[in-house]
Every structure is written in structure tokens, then in C-alpha cells.
């Protein structure tokens, strides 16, 4: 038996909205939280999450496991994730295709991996280890990147598709990150989509970016941009309806703005359903 | 071609320490921006994340020194006290210690203790929950065993002592504070109990004797010994009153009685 998210639009739940969501139970299809924010021993945050979990499917989205670090996997971090997953029984658990610490120093950011065979093998071993420890299939997400390395041996989409193919994990496809990388590194985002097998995609992320000079920065601090909505529509046409999340982490607006963005995604999902029917 | 480990080490050096040779060794290619600009995006992101995280934990320190001073202090702190966890919420326990030796903050003698208070408040909110003290069982302890009672404090309890009136400093720098923001540093020393009770995190000013008493209990001292130490520090220390208040306030959550070998 494996739980899964509904093919509807959900929102990323952050602490400023926790009390309001608990009180009002807004019509979001499901909710996603950052796992680390609940790596606590006790207190009101966990109690609130458990209360919310009673009414919504919840996704635990990790930002700190650092699957791609050459350093050993942080066992205590994985143990806390397991403890939280046992307690919350989330529909899905996800992490990022990135690295975050070296020689014991954490940078607490989603840093870009070189697209090499060494990095690919390492990350596949790590995904295997995490799936074994959590006793479940996890989702891994493609990240934004502001630079690439000369040692790259494959395209990003080949790397991402290979992780899913080799480990059996699922993909959390961030369509905004694909768009940001397509602009930053000059590739066709459709080539990216066409390399991804629809059945490997279990979730989609949408967020806003901001331009800084000639570079797009994935700030999660704005509404989803028009070309990203277009790419999302194409993704849904290609892959079929998928659980879709609106993420907002910088200058977090009123909850209503997130729900409004989620309603737009929901309309695109329903339009696809209508065509399919 | 660098190994993955070498590349990550060089990336860290180029990002945090602006190491030119490390940046060159990364072989950053193509894209819309130069290698310098690309690595600068990560530098801004990484430092920006820490500034935000520490501002959430230390809002009063930030208010006392101003945003520009605070950001510069955080940037220096990050370079000298590395984060040791993938969970950024855990970062910052050493900020008070860092501030003690941070030269630009030398004149702000009370700042490290304010930081200590803010860390305690932050940690109290996420500490483990604890069951209530079993009062019936406590009442049943025979009189001749009462002196050897040992109490367990709530996991959220922190005891903070400062030469400066840090509670007043903290209070007048809360976002909702209205009125005079001046604090006389000669107002006196503070002994504080920070903990999470049923109504949330609280900060209570306690007496010197009470501080010594609770600190001794936290160390595992038996009640008789803790009470003696408190009375040495504050002759008027009232054991019965202290026990009543901290049992009612739920700072004391469990007890044990050891039969000493005779």
C-alpha cells in the first residue's frame, strides 16, 4: 500500500499561515511543508502539523539532506526525517538533486552538482539508502542553477531521468526551475520535458523567479510567470494531471494569494481532465 | 577533472571565502553570466539565508545593532562558526559566544547576554514535551526520604544570569512595545527562567537563591543540597515557596528518590 497525493493543486504551508490554515481549513487540494521545520522534539509546531494532517494530505519536502554531498550522508538528519515521517504519515517525502555540505561545513543551500557519472552514481546510491531507511519511494526535485561546470558529461535532463530510471524513485519536477535553467543556460525547455517519462513524475512545483541582470533567480518570492504557466500547461498535456504545488518562501504574501495561484493551476488540471474525458 | 569532493571543497572556498584559485579550479562554463557573477549569486543566497535565519532567532539583537551591523556580524559569524547541520533552524547556538569576541560589538557589553536569552527563547519553543508532575506520588514520599528527592526540570527550561538588565532590554525592544525605550544599565543584574508552559514560552525574573536552587536541580543535586546552596547565596531563600511556584508553573515535571547506601 502506498499513499499518494491527489492530482490537484496544493500550496506550500509556511509558518506565517499555519494558524490561519488550521482555523479556516481553506480549499487547498493538499499541503506541503519543509521537513526540517518540524525536526523538533516537541512544542506547538508539531501539534499544529498533526492537526492539519488530520484534514489534508501532507507532503514532507526536505531541503537539508544533501543527497549529492561527497561527505557521508548525515545519519542524524535522516533519522529525524524518519521520526517525522513515522509520526505524520505523509503522502510523499521529497528531497533535492543537489549538495549542501563539504568537509563537515553546511552551506544550507541547494547547490548545483556537476553533471558527471561520479555525481550520478553517488546520488543514486544515496537515493537507494534513503528509500531503504524510510521504507518508501521518495521523490527528488530538479534544482535551479546559476552556473555549470566544465566537467559536465551530460545534459541536466539526462541526469534527472537517469536518477529515476536507476533507483525507481519518482520525480518532483519543478517547472519553474526548468524554465529558469533554460534561460540561464540557453536550452529549450521542451527538450527537457521530452526527456522525462510521464510515469516517473509524481509531483510538480510552481513558483516565481526574479530577474537579476541577465540571470533569472529562483526566489520563490513572486507569482508564477506567464512563460512558466505556459510550460506547465505543456507539461500537463504531456504527462497528464499531476499533484501541483504553489511555493512561496520570500516575502510571503497573504494566504489568499497562494490560494489564487493554486486555483489557476487547478483550472489547468481540470481543463486537461475535460479533454481526456 | 576534479573529483566531486574537490569540486565541492573549491565551491565552498570560492563562495564563502572568495578564494580566486578555488574559483578558477571549478571550470565554470557558459551560461548568461560570468563565473564571478554565478558564484556571487550563490554567495548572496547562502549569506542571505543565514541573515534571515539568524534574524528570526535574534530579532532583539538585530534591533539593538541595526540591520547593516547585524548582517555584517552574521557574515563574519558564518565564516568563523560553520553550520554543522542540514537543518538551518539548528544554526546559531554559538552566536552569543561569537559576539563576545566580535570587536565591532565590543562596546555593547550586554549584547552576548541578550543573544543568550533569545537563543533560550527559541529553543524553549521546540524542546520536548513532558508529562505533568505526579503530585500524589510526590505527596506519598515519606518524610525521611524527602531530603534526598531529586527533581527533573521541563526540557524547555533555561536559566540565564546576566550582570545587565537584559529582560528590560528585551521587553522595550519588542515590536509591540510602546513608550520609553531607554534602559538604565545600572538597573541591575538579572536572573531569568525561560521555559515553555501550557500558555507558551515565558520569561520570568527569579531571585538569586532561586536561580542557584534551580541550577542545582538541573545538575541533578538532591533537594537538600540544592536548598543549602541557595540559602548560602541568598539567606532569605524560601524553599517551600520556590517549590510551590515551580511545581505550579510546571518547571518541575518529575522526581526520583534514591535510597543512599548506609
Image: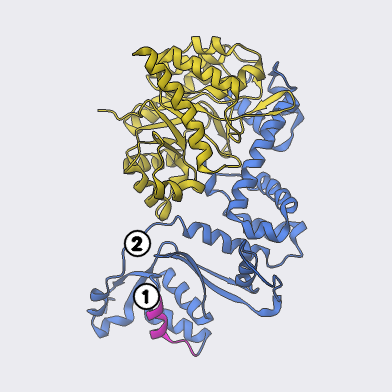
Chain colours: A yellow, B blue
Q: Is residue A126 visible?
A: no
Residue in the picture at 57% in, 61% down: B118
Query: Of callouts 2 and 1, which one flags the residue occurring earlier in the amino acid sequence?
Result: 2
Whether residue A177 is visible here, answered yes or no, is yes
Identify the magenta region: B236-247
Host chain of mark 2: B
Q: Quadrant of residue B105?
A: bottom right
Q: Relative to A65, does residue B38 appear above or below in the rendering? A: above
Q: Quadrant of the N terminus of chain A?
A: top left
> Which residue lies at the image location 55% right of the left edge and 26% below the top edge?
A143
Residue under label 1, please give it: B248
Residue placed under numbered mark 2 in the picture: B130
**Quick check: do tags 2 and 1 share a chain?**
yes
- From the top left corner, tell me how far across and down residue B21 is, in percent: 75, 27
Q: Locate residue B250, reporting x and y percent.
A: 38, 70
Residues marked 2 and 1 touching at CB (< 8 Å): no
For the residue pair B9 and A131, the one nearer the viewer reads as: A131
* Residue furthest out toward the bottom: B236
Mark-to-mark CA distance, 2 and 1? 14 Å
Occupied quadrant, residue B107: bottom right
Q: Nearer the viewer, mark 2 or mark 1?
A: 1
- Most frequent secondary structure within the magenta stretch: helix
Q: Secondary structure at mark 2?
A: loop
Placement of B238 over or under A155, stated as above or below? below
Amino acid at each position: 500500500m502506498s499513499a499518494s497525493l491527489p492530482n490537484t493543486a496544493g500550496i506550500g504551508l509556511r509558518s506565517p499561515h499555519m494558524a490561519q490554515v488550521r482555523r479556516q481549513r481553506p480549499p487547498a487540494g493538499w499541503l506541503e511543508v519543509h521537513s526540517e521545520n518540524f525536526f523538533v522534539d516537541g512544542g506547538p509546531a508539531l501539534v499544529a502539523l498533526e492537526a492539519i494532517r488530520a484534514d489534508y494530505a501532507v507532503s514532507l519536502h526536505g531541503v537539508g539532506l544533501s543527497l549529492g554531498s561527497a561527505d557521508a550522508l548525515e545519519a542524524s538528519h535522516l533519522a529525524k526525517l524518519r521520526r517525522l515521517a513515522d509520526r505524520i504519515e505523509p503522502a510523499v517525502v521529497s528531497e533535492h538533486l543537489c549538495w549542501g555540505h563539504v568537509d563537515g561545513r553546511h552551506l544550507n543551500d541547494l547547490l548545483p552538482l556537476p553533471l558527471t557519472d561520479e555525481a550520478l552514481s553517488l546520488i543514486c546510491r544515496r537515493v537507494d539508502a534513503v528509500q531503504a531507511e524510510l521504507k518508501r519511494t521518495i521523490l527528488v526535485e530538479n534544482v535551479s542553477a546559476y552556473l555549470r561546470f566544465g566537467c559536465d558529461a551530460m545534459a541536466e535532463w539526462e541526469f534527472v531521468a537517469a536518477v529515476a530510471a536507476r533507483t525507481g524513485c519518482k520525480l518532483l519536477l519543478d517547472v519553474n526551475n526548468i524554465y529558469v535553467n533554460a534561460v540561464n543556460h540557453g536550452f529549450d525547455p521542451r527538450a527537457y520535458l521530452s526527456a522525462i517519462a510521464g510515469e516517473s513524475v509524481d509531483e510538480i512545483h510552481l513558483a516565481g523567479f526574479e530577474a537579476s541582470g541577465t540571470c533569472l533567480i529562483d526566489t520563490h518570492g513572486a507569482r508564477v510567470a506567464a512563460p512558466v504557466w505556459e510550460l506547465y500547461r505543456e507539461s500537463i498535456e504531456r504527462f497528464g494531471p499531476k499533484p501541483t504545488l504553489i511555493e512561496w518562501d520570500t516575502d510571503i504574501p497573504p494566504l489568499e494569494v497562494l490560494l489564487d495561484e493554486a486555483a489557476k493551476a487547478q483550472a489547468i488540471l481540470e481543463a486537461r481532465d475535460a479533454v481526456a474525458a | 577533472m576534479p573529483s566531486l569532493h574537490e569540486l565541492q571543497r573549491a565551491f565552498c572556498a570560492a563562495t564563502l571565502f572568495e578564494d580566486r584559485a578555488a574559483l578558477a579550479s571549478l571550470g565554470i562554463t557558459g551560461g548568461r553570466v560570468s563565473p564571478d557573477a554565478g558564484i556571487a549569486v550563490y554567495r548572496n543566497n547562502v549569506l542571505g539565508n543565514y541573515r534571515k535565519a539568524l534574524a528570526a532567532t535574534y530579532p532583539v539583537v538585530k534591533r539593538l545593532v541595526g540591520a547593516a551591523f547585524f548582517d555584517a556580524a552574521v557574515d563574519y559569524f558564518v565564516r568563523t562558526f560553520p553550520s554543522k547541520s542540514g537543518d538551518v533552524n539548528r544554526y546559531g547556538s554559538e552566536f552569543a559566544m561569537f559576539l563576545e569576541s566580535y570587536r565591532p560589538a565590543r562596546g555593547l557589553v550586554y549584547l552576548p547576554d541578550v543573544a543568550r536569552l533569545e537563543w533560550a527563547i527559541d529553543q524553549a519553543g521546540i524542546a520536548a514535551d513532558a508529562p505533568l508532575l505526579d503530585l500524589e506520588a510526590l505527596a506519598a514520599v515519606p518524610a525521611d526520604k524527602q531530603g534526598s528527592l531529586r527533581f527533573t526540570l521541563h526540557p524547555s527550561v533555561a536559566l540565564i544570569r546576566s550582570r545587565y538588565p537584559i529582560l528590560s532590554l528585551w521587553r522595550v525592544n519588542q515590536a509591540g512595545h510602546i513608550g520609553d525605550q531607554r534602559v538604565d544599565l545600572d538597573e541591575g543584574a538579572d536572573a531569568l527562567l525561560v521555559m515553555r508552559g501550557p500558555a507558551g514560552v515565558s520569561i520570568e525574573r527569579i531571585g538569586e537563591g532561586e536561580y542557584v536552587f534551580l541550577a542545582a536541580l538541573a545538575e541533578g543535586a538532591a533537594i537538600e543540597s540544592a536548598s543549602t546552596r541557595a540559602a548560602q547565596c541568598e539567606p532569605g531563600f524560601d524553599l517551600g515557596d520556590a517549590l510551590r511556584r515551580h511545581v505550579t508553573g510546571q518547571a518541575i515535571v518529575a522526581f526520583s528518590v534514591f535510597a543512599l547506601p548506609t
